[in-house]
Structures are given as structure tokens and as C-alpha cells.
Image: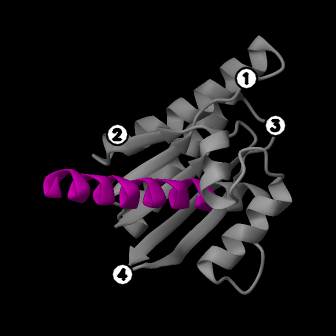
Amino acid sequence: MRVLGIDPGSRITGLGVVELQGSDLVGVQSQTVRLGDGELSQRLGAIHHAVTAMIKETKPDVVAVEQVFMATNAKAALTLGHARGSAVCAAVVAGVPVTEYSAKQIKQAVVGTGGAAKTQVQHMVRVLLGLTKTPQSDAADALACAICHLHSAQMQQKLSRGTRRA
């Protein structure tokens, strides 16, 4: 199974693809899309374009997106929601199923605690994927989102096997 994880942001969006090969997690590709301070519509278009290009290049089976967290103000939350929507639309248009995870779920799956710091997420992503260098923060968050989905999918498989046996 191959998963594209997305850490959406209106100024920086992280993308990361992780594949499950047997029982090993393999980092396929990651990138940080820096969007700058231009018009929001142009930044949203750039997010859509980057996600579409990553899907075409890596052919994921599913896209996992970090849910919008509670922002400090309504405008920030709305802007983040637009960025997330642009990424989700790119996946849906490409015909790839989308799943969502909270930041707490992602940190729990990768670090073991929902309150982990960004540096802890970066470190564990590097360790879990056997990377030679630590990925940039937003790319690490995207890879962590993909890892979270793979862990969830593995657990669902185990539960369904157990249910069939019972």
C-alpha cells in the first residue's frame, strides 16, 4: 500500500509518500511546497497543482490529510480550511480516496504521545523510515500523516482477521 500524506498550509504545505513493503515502512518521496505571500487564490492553485503532480508521479492508493486544528482566530482557520480543501479536491479529482486524521492521532501513531513536539515527530519519521537526514518540519508532518494511515490500516486488517476467526 502506498499513501500520500498531506500537511496542508496556506503558506507551506508538506507532501510525503510512504509505502508499506511487507512489514517495512519505506519513504518514497517528500517535498515542501513554499507558497509565499501572494494572493490566496494563486496559493490554492499551487497547492492543487503540487498535489496533482505528486499523485501523477507516485500513484498512491490513498491520500491521508491532517484535519484542521483549532486556530487562534476564525480567519486563520478559514484560510487553512481553503488550503486543505484545495489538496483534498486534487485527490478527489484524481480518483484517489481521502482519509483524515487529527494532529493528535498522527503524533500518537508516530511518536506514541498526542502532545509530541515537532522535533520529536521529525526524529521518529527519520527513524521509522530509515532516512539518512531529518526531513524539513512540514514534509515530516506529511510523512507522519502517511505513516499514521498505514498503522491504522494494519490495525484494521488485524481486527478484521480476528473478527472472522471469532
Q: Which residue is mark 1?
A: 70
- Which region is colored magenta? 143-166
> Label 4 vs label 1: CA separation?
37 Å
Residue 115 in view (yes/no): yes
> Residue at position x 71%, y 45% from top?
114
Q: Please say if 117 is above or below 102.
A: below
Q: Residues within 10 Å of mark 3 (few under 14, many from 20)?
A: few
Q: Amino acid at mark 3?
A: Asp
What secondary structure is found at the residue carrying circle 1?
Answer: loop
> Label 3 vs label 4: CA separation?
42 Å
Q: Amino acid at mark 4?
A: Gly
Mark 2 or mark 4: which comes first in sequence? Answer: 4
Q: Nearer the viewer, residue 165 or 94?
A: 165
Q: Which residue is mark 4?
A: 22
> Residue at position x 42%, y 41% from top?
99
What secondary structure is found at the residue carrying circle 3?
Answer: loop
Instruction: Please name which of the two marks, 1 or 3, marks the residue nearer to the observer.
Output: 1
Residue placed furthest toward the front: 166
Decide if residue 117 is on the left or right side of residue 56: right
Check whether the beta carbons of the residues at disc 4 and disc 1 lie within 8 A of each other.
Answer: no
User: Measured from the top left, where is residue 41 in percent x and y?
Assistant: 62, 28
Instruction: Please name which of the two marks, 3 or 4, marks the residue nearer to the observer.
Output: 4
User: Measured from the top left, where is residue 25 in percent x and y?
Assistant: 50, 76
Q: Please say if 157 is above or below 36.
A: below
Magenta stretch: includes residue 145: yes
Magenta segment main secondary structure: helix
Identify the mark at residue 92; answer none if there is no mark.
2
> Label 2 vs label 4: CA separation?
28 Å
User: Measured from the top left, where is residue 162 in percent x and y?
Assistant: 24, 57
Identify the mark at residue 37; answer none if there is no mark.
3
